[in-house]
Amino acid sequence: MAGTRRDIANLHEDWVGMSSRLDNFDGRLQRIERRLDLIDDPTSAAGA
């Protein structure tokens, strides 16, 4: 039983790590999309 609990705890730790990495990728992707929108639409930069 203790081994099963340890395995579940390890899976939870892995899940938290992957979730954190996905959050980081999401933030990076949002920044890239904002930059591309500025490049693709020069009229929005001129109006700012």
Image (spheres, rainbow, N blue to C red):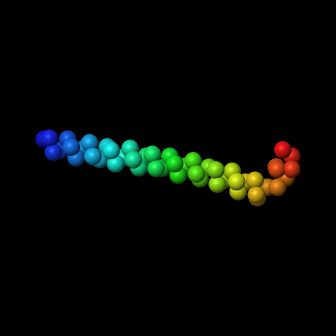
- In x, y percent, where is residue 36? 70, 56
- In x, y percent, where is residue 8? 25, 44
In the image, taking residue 35 as reference, residue 46 lies left or right, namely right
- In x, y percent, where is residue 43? 85, 52
Q: Residue furthest left?
A: 1
Quadrant (top left/top right/bottom left/bottom right) for the C terminus: top right
As drawn, 4 above or below 42: above
In the image, taking residue 18 as reference, residue 26 lies left or right, namely right
Quadrant (top left/top right/bottom left/bottom right) for the N terminus: top left
Residue at 26% across, 42% down: 9
Q: Residue furthest right?
A: 47
Residue at 86% across, 50% down: 46
In the image, taking residue 10 as reference, residue 2 lies left or right, namely left
Q: Residue furthest bottom?
A: 40
Residue at 27% across, 46% down: 10
- In x, y percent, where is residue 41? 79, 55
Q: Quadrant of residue 3?
A: top left
How many marks do you count on the picture? 0
Residue at 43% across, 46% down: 19
As drawn, 34 above or below 5: below
